[in-house]
Image (tube, rainbow, N blue to C red):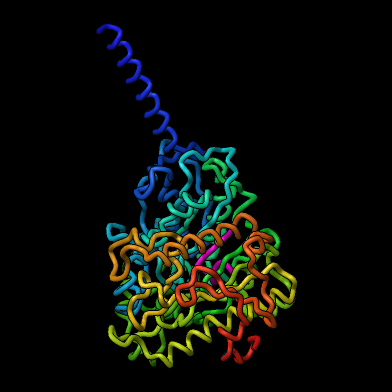
């Protein structure tokens, strides 16, 4: 009996030590602070660190200005839960996203707030400082007016687990907070602090990702819609010092969505609305002191009809630092980072953008086709063609997964970010949407394939996709990678005219 007690005590000590070591594995000590993570809700083989600050909170005098490097913090930062998401502008009422794809919405318990400059990190549970894993950095979409990095469809567990990589997502300032436009006090500089937030997050990741098991010399950016455009913007703004080796732009490239309000009329409207008087510096100081909720509330109370049809919108503006006015010219001259590029979009992109829509018949299909060509097909064509002409490693895909029931089961709903839950592997784990449910065998197989393709590119942006048999893009050959057509898990290599037959717009290849 005595010996049994000794053995039991030893077993308890071993178990306690293992538990202690396991808990220690959830803490990562950085030179500036220690963060406490958690085991992923979806897999015991993945750690997740949510809401790690990468910059000082952009409050008070820092509102509208470039981000400031995060200062050291004593103690342990709780990174077990998401933090505030950045304030969201009026999104114009119900949409396909709010009504159907609720997995694209933030978790309901989250609050908005200006203290929102955070990264989230998913890493294999056993990754160490010397693991040197590839890092995939995600930039969310939302038109640069909404969206966030705490969305169920973009939960990085399955990519990290299945592909043995590290996934990072980031929040950046949106709408007037991230894109105030022409602020007189700034003299034409730093018009897009939201883009500078993205750069700051990449710099933070480059500096500290080794502590989570990542290799700073093997990082790529990927993003969708406005996030895809932001990925592309980044490649021009930091062309000589990108810190990343490759770029994936899903459903958006530089120039896809245009720019807003270059003269600064909307800034002036907001200044006048809040009675901010005095010189340009005093006006700026005044708006920096307005509660953030009041600024957001203005977006809901603003009446376009009463203002001669003018929208109160804030988005990327050309300042020749982070955003440029002529991307076609820059591409032709090769003025961009020379990593590998994977660019593409989905069939009928406009399905998710046209409002109002009918739940039975969907949005106006004529407008859908125009939007799909103007903003996506033709923009992807132009970007990929001009880069391939410069002998940049360039691949272009065309996702046509309209028969994948789990992500597009309405007869008219042929897009709506349909590739995202398949790439992230979250299509069936998030049940709080009108879609969702168990994957079909075809969806499961395609999800595994496309996730592997994205990770293969990330690990080797120059040659990785060639190892899968994907041809580099040439507008005159069958090099458009058609994905999920008629539910197929095998890509077809087709002529770009499949997507681009209407691309005769000025400034685009045809």
Question: Foreground residue, 131 or 61?
Answer: 131
Magenta span has 178? no
Residue at 42 percent of width and 66 percent of height: 443
Q: Residue 310 in the image: x percent, y percent?
A: 41, 88
Magenta span has 231? yes
Residue 358 against residue 166 in the figure, above or below: below
Where, quadrant-wise, is the N terminus in this rendering?
A: top left
Residue 456 against residue 128 in the figure, above or below: below
Residue at 60 percent of width and 68 percent of height: 342
Residue 189 visible, this orientation: no
Horizontal arrangement in the rendering, residue 117 relative to residue 479 (left or right) = left
Quadrant assignment, res 31: top right
Q: Residue furthest top?
A: 2
Write down the region rendered in magenta: 220-232
Residue 135 visible, this orientation: yes
Residue at 58 percent of width and 50 percent of height: 134
Q: Residue 115 in the image: x percent, y percent?
A: 40, 56
Quadrant assignment, res 414: bottom left
Q: Residue 142 in the image: x percent, y percent?
A: 43, 71
Residue at 40 percent of width and 90 percent of height: 365
């Amino acid at each position: 009996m005595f010996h049994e007690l000794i053995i039991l005590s030893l077993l308890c000590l071993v178990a306690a030590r293992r538990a202690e070591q396991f808990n220690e594995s959830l803490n990562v000590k950085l030179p500036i602070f220690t963060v406490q993570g958690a085991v992923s809700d979806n897999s015991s083989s993945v750690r997740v660190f949510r809401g790690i600050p990468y910059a000082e909170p952009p409050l008070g005098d820092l509102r509208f200005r470039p981000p400031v490097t995060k200062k050291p913090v004593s103690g342990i930062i709780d990174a077990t839960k998401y933090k505030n998401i950045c304030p969201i502008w009026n999104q114009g009422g119900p949409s396909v996203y709010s009504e159907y794809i609720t997995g694209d919405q933030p978790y309901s318990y989250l609050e908005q707030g200006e203290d929102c400059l955070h990264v989230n990190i998913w890493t294999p549970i056993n990754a160490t400082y010397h693991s040197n894993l590839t890092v995939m950095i995600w930039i969310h979409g939302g038109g640069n007016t909404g969206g966030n990095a705490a969305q169920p469809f973009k939960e990085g567990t399955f990519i990290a687990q299945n592909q043995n990589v590290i996934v990072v997502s980031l929040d950046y300032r949106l709408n007037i907070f991230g894109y105030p436009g022409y602020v007189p006090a700034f003299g034409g500089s730093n018009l897009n602090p939201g883009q500078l937030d993205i750069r700051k997050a990449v710099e933070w990741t480059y500096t500290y990702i080794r502590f989570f098991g990542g290799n700073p010399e093997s990082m790529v950016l990927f993003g969708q819609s406005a996030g895809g455009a932001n990925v592309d913007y980044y490649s021009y703004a930091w062309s000589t010092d990108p810190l990343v080796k490759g770029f994936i732009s899903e459903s958006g490239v530089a120039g896809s969505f245009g720019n807003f309000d270059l003269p600064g009329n909307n800034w002036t409207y907001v200044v006048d609305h809040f009675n901010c008087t005095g010189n340009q510096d005093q006006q700026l100081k005044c708006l920096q002191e307005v509660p953030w909720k009041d600024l957001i509330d203005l977006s809901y109370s603003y009446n376009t009809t009463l203002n001669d049809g003018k929208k109160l919108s804030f988005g990327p503006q050309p300042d020749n630092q982070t955003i440029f006015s002529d991307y076609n010219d820059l591409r032709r001259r090769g003025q961009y980072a020379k990593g590998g590029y994977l660019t593409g979009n989905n069939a009928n992109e406009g399905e998710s953008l046209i409002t109002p829509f009918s739940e039975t018949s969907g949005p106006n299909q004529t407008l859908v086709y125009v939007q799909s060509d103007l903003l996506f097909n033709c923009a992807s064509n132009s970007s990929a063609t001009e880069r391939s002409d410069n002998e940049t490693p360039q691949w272009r895909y065309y996702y046509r997964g309209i028969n994948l029931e789990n992500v597009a089961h309405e007869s008219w709903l042929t897009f709506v970010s349909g590739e995202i839950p398949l790439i992230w592997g979250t299509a069936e784990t998030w049940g709080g949407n009108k879609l969702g449910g168990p994957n079909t065998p075809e969806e499961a197989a395609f999800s595994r394939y496309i996730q592997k393709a994205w990770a293969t590119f990330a690990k080797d942006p120059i040659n990785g996709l060639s190892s899968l048999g994907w041809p580099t893009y040439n507008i005159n050959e069958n090099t458009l990678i058609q994905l999920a057509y008629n539910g197929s898990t095998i890509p077809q290599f087709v002529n770009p005219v499949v997507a681009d037959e209407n691309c005769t717009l000025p400034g685009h290849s045809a």
